[in-house]
């Protein structure tokens, strides 16, 4: 089941188990049950501190593995075979159930232990989803720490009927006590704050009490991280406030153009950025969304969704961008019900089904190539009369028998029935004829839109919503700088965003010197 190298690495990790743990596996005669039992036996044979019980006549979701301290009822469950991206989740669950400490802050761990109401989490995932492990690992840790909490990972590929009945068409999807709690990547802190009724008021009070910063960076992607590091190295009081650290990089699977690094994954790069930032005296505030920017005398104020207001002498805006939407009827209604933006995450949910990809750039053609190996067929709709993707990608897509490319096609409506996507309507821009395409999934890959809505009226924006900056990163509002994909800087690339972040920080430092 496990390759030799993986087994060797796992053995080293299992040596960190402090107290004995028990694995309880429920199986039947299907192939996935045999895989899970084989995996559990290999793990149990690698450590004397791991016991195994196999139940072959059990009810409920089968196959499943329950992890917990010996002598206690396990509260962490894997329904399916936790391999792929979820293998790390399994390893962490084994360590944490065995007494190995988490790296989360003591404040957050205490908050989890203090939750008093029963919480039953279910995270629906696909094993190819690189966003899912964050959610699974978060709820698993909560369950290990608090006897009131249970956590279950459900592999949608193993339990397709359950996924179909619930209408789940995007992962990760998190349920709490039988009701939907959220979709997409969520951090431990975000999930805890969602279920802690007193969290918002307490956090707002703590943030309001913070002293003004010399530089406050809004956004935690590559541009924001670079800006914070450059500012902190100048010895000035620096803070970062962001919805999540890593920004859109967290949704990027493969990165092959980051100079000096041949290949990496977005989450790995984001983790490295965060570790670098934490080497400096930077006040990092995550899970906070900026809603307004204003100037009060010589002080800049950034208002947050939780109601708190942060003050600073200078501000660097690095809020990045998000996937552009089609803005056609039905898109919003069927988002996560067939309309998706991440082919790596949600593609497995459409196994054997017809899908469409909107957009013929690199991201669209890459999505079509990936989806061709999973779905029944893929139709790419490109608005222009030619594809914008690199030639090597176009040739690969055109060589696949189940990929069809339609050019000069403008999507006009998402069609749905019974709460999910059943097709789309598009117009041929050459003949002006309308066509209906029967698909179960629509993957939108048509570029980015800047996260700048909260800045309207505060400073100069382009018609597309980009923050206008000069060569020093300065915006139209003195003392406010900007960097990365939210700005007019051409070529939205990670390495370019980092450079603009450094420029903005140096510009802010120069501003402080000249205006102190």
Image: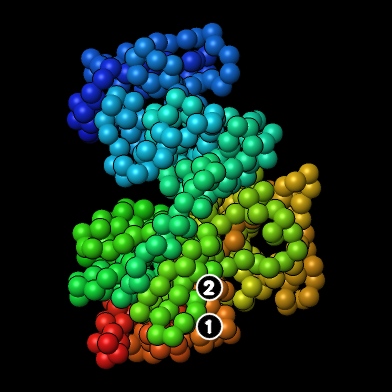
Q: In percent of the image, x 54 and y 69: which residue is there?
A: 291
Observer-nearest residue: 165 or 16? 16
Observer-nearest residue: 140 or 267? 140
Pointer 2 residue? 292
Q: Would residue 456 appear left or right of 33 to someone viewing this image?
A: right
In the depicted structure, whether residue 221 falls above or below residue 264: below
Gap in angstroms between the C-alphas marked 2 and 1:
8 Å
In the depicted structure, whether residue 212 falls above or below residue 124: below
Pointer 1 residue? 458
Which mark is on residue 289? none
Badge 2: how crowded within 10 Å, few (<14), some, or many (20+)? some
Q: Would residue 264 appear left or right of 370 to someone viewing this image?
A: left
In the depicted structure, whether residue 390 falls above or below residue 47: below
Observer-nearest residue: 203 or 125? 203
Please tell me whether mark 1 sits on a helix, a strand or a loop.
loop
Q: In percent of the image, x 65 and y 30: which residue is there?
A: 161
In the rendered image, residue 73, in percent from the top left (x then y), is placed at: 44, 16
How many marks are shown on the rendered structure? 2
Residue 259, by quadrant, is: bottom left
In the rendered image, residue 457, in percent from the top left (x then y), is placed at: 57, 83
Do tag 2 and tag 1 residues touch (Cβ < 8 Å)?
Answer: yes
In the rendered image, residue 490, in percent from the top left (x then y), is placed at: 42, 82
Q: In percent of the image, x 47 and y 10: which residue is there?
A: 55
Please tell me whether mark 2 sits on a helix, a strand or a loop.
strand
Observer-nearest residue: 374 or 470? 470
């Amino acid at each position: 089941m496990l390759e030799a190298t993986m087994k060797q690495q796992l053995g080293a990790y299992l040596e960190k188990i402090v107290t004995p743990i028990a694995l309880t596996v429920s199986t039947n005669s299907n192939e996935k049950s045999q895989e899970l039992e084989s995996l559990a036996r290999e793990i149990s044979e690698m450590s004397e501190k791991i016991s195994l019980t196999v139940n072959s006549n059990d009810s409920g979701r089968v196959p499943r593995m329950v992890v917990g301290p010996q002598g206690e009822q396990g509260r962490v469950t894997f329904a399916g075979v936790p391999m792929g991206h979820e293998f790390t989740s399994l390893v962490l669950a084994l360590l944490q159930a065995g007494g190995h400490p988490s790296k989360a802050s003591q404040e957050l761990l205490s908050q989890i232990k203090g939750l008093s109401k029963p919480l039953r989490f279910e995270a629906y995932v696909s094993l190819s989803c690189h966003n899912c492990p964050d959610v699974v690992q978060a709820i698993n840790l909560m369950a290990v720490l608090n006897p009131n909490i249970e956590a279950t990972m459900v592999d949608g590929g193993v339990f397709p009927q359950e996924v179909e009945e619930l209408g789940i068409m995007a992962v990760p999807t998190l349920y709490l006590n039988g009701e939907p709690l959220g979709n997409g990547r969520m951090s431990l802190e975000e999930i805890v704050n969602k279920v802690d009724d007193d969290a918002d008021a307490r956090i707002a009070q703590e943030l309001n009490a913070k002293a003004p910063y010399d530089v406050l960076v809004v956004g935690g992607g590559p541009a924001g991280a670079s800006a914070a590091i450059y500012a902190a190295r100048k010895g000035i009081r620096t803070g970062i406030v962001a919805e999540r650290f890593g920004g859109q990089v967290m949704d990027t699977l493969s990165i092959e153009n980051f100079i000096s690094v041949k290949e990496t994954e977005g989450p790995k790069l984001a983790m490295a950025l965060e570790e670098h930032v934490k080497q400096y005296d930077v006040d990092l505030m995550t899970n906070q969304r900026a809603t307004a920017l204003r100037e009060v005398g010589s002080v800049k104020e950034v208002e947050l969704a939780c109601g708190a207001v942060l003050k600073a002498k200078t501000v660097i805006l690095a809020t990045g961008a998000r996937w552009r939407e089609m803005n056609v009827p039905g898109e919003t209604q069927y988002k996560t019900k067939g309309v998706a933006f991440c082919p790596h995450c949600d593609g497995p949910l459409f196994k054997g089904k017809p899908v469409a990809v909107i957009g013929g750039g690199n991201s669209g053609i890459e999505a079509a190539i990936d989806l061709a190996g999973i779905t029944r067929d893929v139709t790419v709709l490109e608005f222009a009369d030619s594809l914008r993707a690199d030639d090597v990608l176009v040739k690969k897509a055109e060589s696949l028998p189940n990929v069809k490319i339609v050019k000069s096609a403008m999507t006009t409506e998402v069609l749905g029935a019974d709460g999910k996507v059943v097709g789309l309507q598009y117009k041929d821009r050459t003949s002006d004829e309308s066509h209906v395409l029967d698909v179960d999934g629509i993957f939108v890959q048509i570029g980015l839109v800047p996260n700048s809505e909260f800045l309207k009226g505060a400073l100069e924006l382009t018609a597309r919503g980009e923050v206008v900056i000069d060569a020093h990163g300065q915006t139209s509002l003195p003392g406010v700088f900007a960097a990365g994909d939210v700005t007019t800087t051409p070529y939205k690339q990670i390495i370019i965003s980092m450079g603009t972040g450094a420029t903005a920080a140096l510009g802010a430092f120069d501003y402080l010197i000249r205006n102190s």
